[in-house]
Each structure stands twice: as C-alpha cells, then as structure tokens.
Amino acid sequence: MKPGSPAGSPYAHVIMPDHLHAITDSAIKPSKVLQYINGIISRRVIDHLKEHGHNASLQKLRRESGSRGHMYSLWAHHNNTLPIFSEDMFMQKVNYIHQNPERAGLVERAEDYRWSSVRIWKRRPLEDEPLMVDIDQINWRRGRSLPRIDKLTGKAEPFRTSGGKAARHSQLSNL
C-alpha cells in the first residue's frame, strides 16, 4: 500500500502471524480495498514459498480451483471493514492496532514489533521501515471528537483524511 494506490493511503497497520489490520482511506468500496491488499500480500507470500521450496506450507494453502483459477489461498474470504466516524474512534483504532503484538505476547513493547506502524506514530521510524505511513496527511479536526452529521440524511459522516477520503479500519484473517 502506498499513497495513490487503489487501497488508498495507509495511516496505521500491523501484520500479525495470522491476520492484519490497516487503517486506510480510499474512494473505492472497502471490499475492493481488501481484495487489493489480499492480492498483493498473497502473491508475494506464495511466490516466496514457491521460490524457496516450502512445499509443505504450499500444501496447507492449496484449495480447489476457485472462480479465478487460483491454486492457493492465503486468506479467509470475508470482509471485516468498519468506517471510522470521529477522531476519537480513529485514535482508538490506531491504538488497538498497535497494541495487537503486545496483547498477543509477541513482544514486550509494541514498538519492538517490526511489522507495525507504531514507531512512525511515535516519530521514531526505523531506517529500513517495512511499510511507511504518512500521518502528516491526516486532516485533524483539532479536538472535535463527535462525528460530523450530514444535514440531508442525518447520518454520521466518516472521518476524512486531508484528501477528503473516508478512513476505514480493515482486518484480513488467514485460513
């Protein structure tokens, strides 16, 4: 994921052994964002397994040929995407995402987990950070914790980034 990609700009993420979390903005449907992220990660993981002869792992991912003819599937096929309606909710999701490795017992401190954006949020990124996020692109409402309400529909508007796109929290789980 990178700014300008179909998945939108990434604002926070953590890649766990059996699932991932990401907060992105995108003008496209959340299911398409997940499909895009799923495709990139799946292709890279499956290619790595093939190139390095990890046949036992590939067999665990093998499935009946699906509608697209893929032999392997890395992820469970369900969407788990939530719109984010306020700065408070945005920050709650960021903190939840970043604490995942610590809660799972993978590290003592969240910032010690390599596959997380927590160091960037603490303004202490690694020189070789695996995935950069641009938190300076967030259009903060400066203390507004309540969602904006659409005057025509009366529904809460999603929290938007500086590009005007709605922020969403997505989760993908593997099989």
Image (spheres, rainbow, N blue to C red):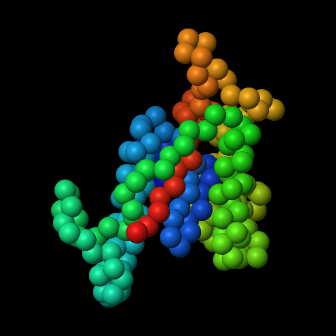
Residue 56 vertical position relative to residue 95 in the rendered view, above or below: below
Residue 87: % across, % down: 72, 37
Q: At 51% from the left edge and 55% from the top edge, which residue is drawn?
A: 171
User: Taking the image as drawn, is residue 2 in sight?
Assistant: no
Residue 155: % across, % down: 58, 22
Q: At 59% from the left edge and 57% from the top edge, which residue is drawn?
A: 13
Q: Residue furthest top?
A: 152
Q: Residue furthest right?
A: 143
Residue 172 vertical position relative to residue 17 in the rendered view, above or below: above
Res. 120 image quadrant: bottom right
Q: Please identify the quadrant where the C terminus is shown.
A: bottom left
Q: How many marks?
A: 0
Q: At 43% from the left edge and 50% from the top edge, which residue is drawn?
A: 79
Q: Nearer the viewer, residue 154 or 134?
A: 154
Q: Is residue 30 left or right of residue 150?
A: left
Residue 122 vertical position relative to residue 105 in the rendered view, above or below: above
Residue 131 vertical position relative to residue 108 in the rendered view, above or below: above
Residue 70: % across, % down: 23, 65
Res. 109 image quadrant: bottom right
Q: Is residue 139 left or right of residue 24?
A: right
User: Taking the image as drawn, is residue 85 in sight?
Assistant: yes
Residue 115: % across, % down: 60, 68
Q: Is residue 7 left or right of residue 82?
A: left
